[in-house]
Amino acid sequence: MTQILFSNPVFVTYVIAASIMILKAISMSWLTVVRMMKVNGGFRAPEDIRKTMLNPNPSAEQVKPNEYVERVRRIHQNDLENIPFFLFAGLLFVFTGPSLLVAQILMYGYVISRFIHFYVYLNEFTHDTRATFWTIGSLILIFMAGRTLVFATMGI
Amino acid sequence: MTQILFSNPVFVTYVIAASIMILKAISMSWLTVVRMMKVNGGFRAPEDIRKTMLNPNPSAEQVKPNEYVERVRRIHQNDLENIPFFLFAGLLFVFTGPSLLVAQILMYGYVISRFIHFYVYLNEFTHDTRATFWTIGSLILIFMAGRTLVFATMGI
Amino acid sequence: MTQILFSNPVFVTYVIAASIMILKAISMSWLTVVRMMKVNGGFRAPEDIRKTMLNPNPSAEQVKPNEYVERVRRIHQNDLENIPFFLFAGLLFVFTGPSLLVAQILMYGYVISRFIHFYVYLNEFTHDTRATFWTIGSLILIFMAGRTLVFATMGI
């Protein structure tokens, strides 16, 4: 029997966590757009300082790095380094047949750790605080991938 | 019954769209290689200006950013920010049992939006045009992930 | 019948290769952390030079790019450009019903190519050598995605 069915509450847990994480990651693109519009800059391509409807008064300043925008880009990059691997590790972990409680703690725990990491990064908390919440998520990821590897190689 | 079977035309639609998007993303690496060879530069690692069979006349210029190469790197980065999430959102969306027509419009629509985005970015169209096609793809992504989240949480 | 079951040795092969690749990619974050601690620098966010328990003697130097750290970031970036697509291409390839031997050669071959690429990049081998091992992995990826596309469109 496949575990990848909506009748399996562990899979439902995964799908909820995964959908939220996908929407979170995509939101970083939109937050970058919002901030670029706010500061009217932080663009990256040379053609972005061409005069257009949305950019009626272009200037060379607009393609210089803008910290207000770059902060979201760093958060986004951190998501790219983590979330796709969570999405896979979580999916494969479902196949190992964990208990619902364990799956919920790990998967919802991961989601919460990433939202706190986001809040802490956006609001310029210290490196130590940010690293702490990143570490929680990363350890969850490592546990799920490691558990799956043990299950696949040894069947236990 | 699982929906993840080749007898389900919605899944077949997903696999076709996903395979094309994977090949598209990987092609960006190869296009970067082609452009690096054309300009004999745009390299990134310090050791890339060591004398080798493929680089018989190295110079320090070769590790300076080259806009012809950087353009493809930006397109590639945009793919990394979007395509892995499409691959997941699409897969999970299949489980919500959409009609074939809806799945085809969303998934093939996404593929088309990304190819136009690529064409527009590569050929230095304005920021407005590029943003339009990125937005189409991003909204499809958000719809699929949001629909999946509703389905997983409320069962409808 | 679904092929995505632990009773299918091709799927087991995939899960082993995928788990190892997930752990490999996540390890790059940790290797970055190790190297940042070693050189006490290579940080990225402006707030990382604030005085904290883990950074008792901050200096502006700490947010300047540090090649010892940047090398791992480049390797990590290369993983982000490749591994998520392997994870998908491999999963979808399982559905095409390949023989166990073919799956093992492609998937374990991919894993080995990535570990050699890592070793070669970390130890500053020439661009030619690094490109060779990247190419092996990339061709495996293209084959698996292309094969899946043919299977999904033509059913053979």
Image (tube, coloured by chain):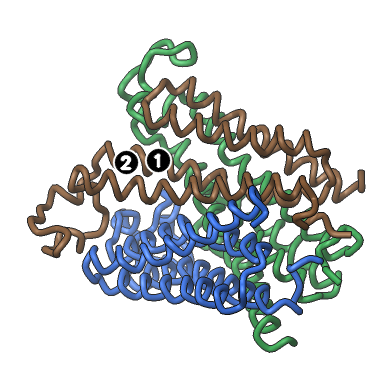
Chain colours: A blue, B green, C brown
Examine the rendering and report whether any part of residue B146 can be seen.
yes
Examine the rendering and report whether any part of residue A84 can be seen.
no
Q: Amino acid at mark 2?
A: Glu
- The reply to whether dot 2 and dot 1 touch (C-beta < 8 Å) is yes
Question: Callout 1: helix, strand or loop?
Answer: helix
Examine the rendered structure and indicate whether residue C20 appears above or below residue A81.
Answer: above
What residue sits right under mark 1 in the picture? C74
Q: Position of residue C45 (x, y in %)?
A: 25, 59
Q: Relative to the observer, which residue lies in front, A143 or A75?
A: A143
Q: Residue furthest left?
A: C57
* Residue at figure coordinates x 59%, y 52% from the top left: A150
Q: Position of residue B74 (x, y in %)?
A: 48, 48
Q: Amino acid at mark 1?
A: Arg
Chain containing the residue with disc 2: C
Mark 1 surroundings: few (<14), some (14-19) or many (≥20) residues within 10 A: some
Q: Work out which quarter of the rendered image holds the C terminus of chain B and state it.
A: bottom right
Question: Callout 2: helix, strand or loop?
Answer: helix
What residue sits right under mark 2 in the picture? C70
Same chain check for tags 2 and 1: yes
> Quick check: A22 left or right of A130?
right
Q: Position of residue A81 (x, y in %)?
A: 45, 55
Chain containing the residue with disc 1: C
Q: Relative to the observer, which residue lies in front, B143 or B125?
A: B143
Examine the rendered structure and indicate whether residue B19 appears above or below residue A109.
Answer: above
Splitting the image into 4 quarters, where does residue A132 fall? bottom left
Q: Work out which quarter of the rendered image holds the N terminus of chain B and state it.
A: bottom right
Mark 2 surroundings: few (<14), some (14-19) or many (≥20) residues within 10 A: some
Q: CA distance from mark 2 to mark 1?
A: 6 Å
* Residue at figure coordinates x 79%, y 46% from the top left: C148
